[in-house]
């Protein structure tokens, strides 16, 4: 995969969350669990009930937008690892037809999330959930623009908003460790760019260190709340790109164990296991 397209894929990680693993599961936690299990109807059911109880909560709208986005990814087979291994699949605008109704719903919901979050942030600039809602709304819009609409330069521009909120979330006390997902993914992506492409792309406080990007993603795995599974998926792809098949397999086995309803994880574990076996057979 060329470096430019890899940047677009890593923008999937453009939202940021909070990280208190010890807390009991909330409705948001349960909704994310359903999303990771590819049970989008289940996620929407949880969100519907919570919006009925808390109609003013912007975070519920952002999570709904994420559920809509990932359902569209699943339909278009964008979540599969081989999609990112083939440049033709990434750039082919004829491969899979986006649903205009889904797009309209996603952007309507993110607009609603932004509006509700802005009200809360005006009253309290340190409101964690409102800040997270803003960050996720920007991330969902970025992700849709990059991988569904394939407007890569536009998605890079949009991602800067997510990075801005990621820095703010990490500056809180305690910090939202999941925000390292955004910064880690972009850090690794910029580190993968060639010199001339870096001349045209500027990200605030991003060094372009692939190793720092990996370490940031590991922080999400260790201390995140909503995004450890996503961070493990990103690290798995990075390890695959670097021909480190066993570490990639180890991480995917963890998410397969934690989300047994997700058949995609099972498929990817089987594929990497096969690649390891074939590599061993070729080794003298």
Image (cartoon, helix red, strand yellow):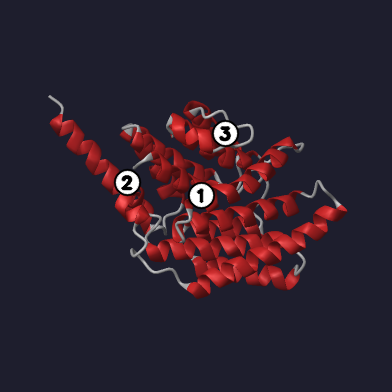
Q: Are marks 1 and 3 in contact (CB under 8 Å)?
A: no
Q: Mark 2 falls on what kind of element?
A: helix
Identify which residue is drawn at 72% across, 73% down: 52
Q: Residues within 10 Å of mark 1 (few under 14, many from 20)?
A: some
Residue farthest to the top, as pictured: 284
Where does the C terminus fall, quadrant-wise?
Answer: top left
Q: Mark 3 falls on what kind of element?
A: helix
Identify which residue is drawn at 52% across, 75% down: 101
Q: Position of residue 157 (x, y in %)?
A: 58, 48
Q: Name the mark nearer the viewer: 2 or 3.
A: 2
Of residue 248 and residue 143, the one placed in the foreground of this image is: 143
Q: Mark 1 falls on what kind of element?
A: helix
Question: Mark 2 highlights which residue?
Answer: 85
Where does the N terminus fall, quadrant-wise?
Answer: top left
Can residue 235 be seen here? The reply is: yes
Question: Mark 1 highlights which residue?
Answer: 153
Q: Position of residue 36 (x, y in %)?
A: 49, 56
Numbered badge on residue 282: none
Question: Mark 3 highlights which residue?
Answer: 219
**Residue 141 located left or right of residue 80:** right
Of residue 103 and residue 225, the one placed in the foreground of this image is: 103
**Residue 187 located left or right of residue 79:** right
């Amino acid at each position: 995969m060329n470096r430019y397209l890899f940047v677009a894929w890593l923008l999937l990680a453009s939202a940021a969350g909070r990280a208190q693993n010890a807390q009991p599961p909330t409705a948001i936690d349960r909704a994310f669990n359903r999303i990771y299990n590819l049970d989008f109807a289940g996620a929407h059911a949880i969100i519907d009930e919570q919006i009925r109880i808390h109609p003013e909560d912007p975070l519920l709208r952002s999570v709904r937008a994420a559920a809509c986005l990932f359902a569209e990814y699943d339909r278009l087979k964008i979540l599969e690892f081989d999609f990112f291994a083939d440049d033709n699949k990434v750039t082919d605008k004829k491969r899979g037809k986006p649903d205009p109704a889904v797009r309209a719903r996603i952007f309507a919901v993110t607009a609603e999330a932004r509006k509700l979050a802005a009200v809360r942030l005006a009253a309290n600039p340190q409101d964690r959930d409102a800040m997270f809602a803003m960050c996720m709304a920007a991330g969902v819009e970025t992700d849709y623009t990059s991988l569904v609409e394939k407007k890569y330069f536009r998605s890079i521009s949009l991602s800067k908003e997510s990075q801005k909120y990621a820095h703010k979330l990490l500056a809180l006390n305690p910090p939202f460790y999941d925000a390292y997902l955004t910064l880690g993914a972009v850090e690794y992506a910029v580190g993968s760019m060639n010199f001339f492409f870096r001349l045209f792309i500027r990200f605030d406080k991003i060094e372009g260190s692939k190793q720092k990007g990996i370490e940031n993603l590991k922080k999400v795995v260790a201390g995140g709340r909503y995004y450890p599974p996503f961070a493990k998926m990103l690290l798995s792809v990075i390890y695959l790109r670097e021909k480190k098949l066993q570490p990639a397999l180890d991480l995917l086995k963890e998410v397969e164990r934690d989300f047994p309803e997700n058949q995609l994880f099972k498929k990817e574990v089987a594929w990497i296991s096969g690649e390891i076996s074939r590599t061993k057979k070729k080794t003298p």
